[in-house]
Image: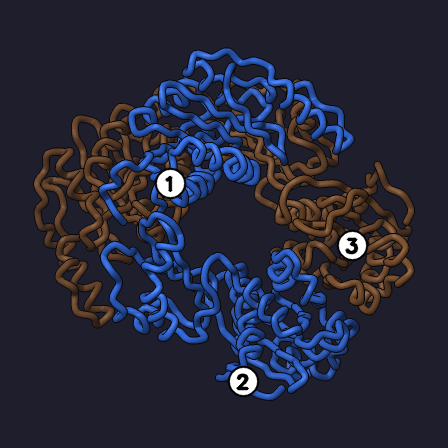
Chain colours: A blue, B brown
């Protein structure tokens, strides 16, 4: 990345909360805020965490002022007395707290909608520093606040991630643009890869030359790897033009290992592929317990192609709901390609889908045997051309095994839709 | 927490890395280090993140020196030229970098074990500040370093989490004990609450007196609130004795709003309750798409009581799999208490379960109507005594609405098992 950064607005991100200093809570908010600022060309020069203490908070804001023109504070705006951010920052700027009537009305509406009387303590959340700009919180009670003093701009945001994110997007980023504080952004392009290990990927692509002003990062994550190119540019179109020839080389080497580009997770990519082919999908899940359905339906509009999932956690449910034969379960066990095949066939029939994918495995920590240790997962894929089965073996804990199995199941459907499903398959 | 903290060693945690300031990477290391320090009675007064820049690093160490006697730095010790932590900190302490022969031998052995020639660039990792204490890294190449100057102690740790953790445990915590810098640890107790807003909870319990040496924090999270008591004590048993009378008062006020204590999420608590009552549970999910099944099966051993979930995302699947009447869907819509009731009844029958809970709602962003806006979620609960239905209304995005609905569904089953399910219910 360009280290000179001439003319770039520098920001400090301050997260406030005893729970962060105690290590109870990980500071996800700082990473989120810094990434959003980077997108509009604002460089985070420092991140700070201080406790719910007025002296600490004002000291942090004072430090931030010496670093750059912007400070984004998050946390400590709750209704309870342990939250002191608003008081401390108002005092630092020499402002009184005054009642902001529109905010009070919004808070009252918030409780009215939920048919709950408003506790008296919430009135305090409508008290804001005099002549501050107030940013509505559409999903909670603590508004965002903008304070300015001689070119120094201080933003206060709630610490609840959803609330912080929506106020940042709707209130703060537009304000920064309006004020001309944004600049050449750091732009990124992401290639999304599945079906190869990180070191395998490195060996495959490491001879592709990368220009010095482009940074390349590898971010492996539960059966997927994100390859991220980043660099400064005036806008996204220019950055994309600048990186197009490199990305084209990667595409050529990666072929179908590259399942997507940008922010689209595999569930969304698979969904678009199903939609484009006019096909519907159903699932049958055992060890993933609904995770596959959850991931597929994380995508708004997924009802266009996803019909449902039969989460058959018990053997009886596999028989009753999906029509798996009791003999199959008895002879081969619940974790077997034979059971996976019948689960997929049952799901395709019950939901009337074009494609059905089934997952049955040992997610652990218990249930492993020498023949089928924890991490053994069988898959069935049923479509008009017949049923295919696969067995994978994963390392890691329950969470990781379930996530990898879910990604793999979606990958199987994708490869079959592309007509490139090959490998350790056999007719089920 | 005791805000005076007389005699307590205060620490600053500094994480170093451009990737943190760019928001690509979340600062998990700071939370981990702070939690480990708290266990041995060392309070983190501040966390800082700075970039891979010598000036920024020395400024951060200088700030840390004004805060307390200890600073723990993590990151920027890699072999590549962008890592400058060692150089910067050595200069700050006025020390030359000298070759540490045992470390070089260790790095050489590290590469020999992997049968890979040692790249020349790794020799730099054996250069340490003169008269520093060097802490072996058993799983990587960058050692830990301890520098001291007039009572100020500075630790340098690699940024790779596994390597940081092992050096902290084997090198730094024993050093702190040996030097007498540790004290009474900070211990915590957590009460887990659902079915009330944060401010409603505050009104309910705010008149319970809390001793000055016990800190109380509220941590709301998607339909649940964690109440966390923390304070100093010699050990966990003593802390639990010390807080027992306060916790007893909270238990008395909270009654069934308190669903658990400690680390057990509601899915696990509900599971234990089902197991204890010898009851089985099935689910029928529409808008949550499998999330309820996923959360219930996050718990190892959940197959003892959880039979499965019918994720019926399409109307056809609701009819085919669960036997919902087409007239019901036509007359009342998929998001209605009538449909929720029939979904629950169908799931109970299909899975042969004692309890079945159904969720159908508008998770958004599309699909809302004036009568049933985004966030409207209907629930059905079916058991031998009959079927109950409920309607809730949530704010927020798709993810938040789905999480709240999942927590609520588990809460309904729990309350019914406890025999205290009351409120806006009606026979379905």
Crowdedness of circle 2 by 10 Å Cα count: few (<14), some, many (20+)?
A: some
Residue visible at 17% across and 42% down?
Answer: B133
Residue A268, image x, y percentages:
57, 62
Chain letter of mark 1 equals B
Residue A90, image x, y percentages:
47, 16
Residue visible at 65% across and 55% down?
Answer: B291
Left or right position of A245 against B186 = left
Q: Nearer the viewer, residue A65 or A14?
A: A65
List the residue tagged with mark 1.
Answer: B30
Residue visible at 66% across and 81% down?
Answer: A383
Q: In the image, which is nearer the foreground, mark 3 or mark 1?
A: 3
Instruction: Specify the quadrant of the image occupied by residue B354.
Output: bottom right
Residue A59, image x, y percentages:
36, 21
Chain letter of mark 2 equals A
Crowdedness of circle 3 by 10 Å Cα count: few (<14), some, many (20+)?
A: many
List the residue tagged with mark 2.
Answer: A425
């Amino acid at each position: 990345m360009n280290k000179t950064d001439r003319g770039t607005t520098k920001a400090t991100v301050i997260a406030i909360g005893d729970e962060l200093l105690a290590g109870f809570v990980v500071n996800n908010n700082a990473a989120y805020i810094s990434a959003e600022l980077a997108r509009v060309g604002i460089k985070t020069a420092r991140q700070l965490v201080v406790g719910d203490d007025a002296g600490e908070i004002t000291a942090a804001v004072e430090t931030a002022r010496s670093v750059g023109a912007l400070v984004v504070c998050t946390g400590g705006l709750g209704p309870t007395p342990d939250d002191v951010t608003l008081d401390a920052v108002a005092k630092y700027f020499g402002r009184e707290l005054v009642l902001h009537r529109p905010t009070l009305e919004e808070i009252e509406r918030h409780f009215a909608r939920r048919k709950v009387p408003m506790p008296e303590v919430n009135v305090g959340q409508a008290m804001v520093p005099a002549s501050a700009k107030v940013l509505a919180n559409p999903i909670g009670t603590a508004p965002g606040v903008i304070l300015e003093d001689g070119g120094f701009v201080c933003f206060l945001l709630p610490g609840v991630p959803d609330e912080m994110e929506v106020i940042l997007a709707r209130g703060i980023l537009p304000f920064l643009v309006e004020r001309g504080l944004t600049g050449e952004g750091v732009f990124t392009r992401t290639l999304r890869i599945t079906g190869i290990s990180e070191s395998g990927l490195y060996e495959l692509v490491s001879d592709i030359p990368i220009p010095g002003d482009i940074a390349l990062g590898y971010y492996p994550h539960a059966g997927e790897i994100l390859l991220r190119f980043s660099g400064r540019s005036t806008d996204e179109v220019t950055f994309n033009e600048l990186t197009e020839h490199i990305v084209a080389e990667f595409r050529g080497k990666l072929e179908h290992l590259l399942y997507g580009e940008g922010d689209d997770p595999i569930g969304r990519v698979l969904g678009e592929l199903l939609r484009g082919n006019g096909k519907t999908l159903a699932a049958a899940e055992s060890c993933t317990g609904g995770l596959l359905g959850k991931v597929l339906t994380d995508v708004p509009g997924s009802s266009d192609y996803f019909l449902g999932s039969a989460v058959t956690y018990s053997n009886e449910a596999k028989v009753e709901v999906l029509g798996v034969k009791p003999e199959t379960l008895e002879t081969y066990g619940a974790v077997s390609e034979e059971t996976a095949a019948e689960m997929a066939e049952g799901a395709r029939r019950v939901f009337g889908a074009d494609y059905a994918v089934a997952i049955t495995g040992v997610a652990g920590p218990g249930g492993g045997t020498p023949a089928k240790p924890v991490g053994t997962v069988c898959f069935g894929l049923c479509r008009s051309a017949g049923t295919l089965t696969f067995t994978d073996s994963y390392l890691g804990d329950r969470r990781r095994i379930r996530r990898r199995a879910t990604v793999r199941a979606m990958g199987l459907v994708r490869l079959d839709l592309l007509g490139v499903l090959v490998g350790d398959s056999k007719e089920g």
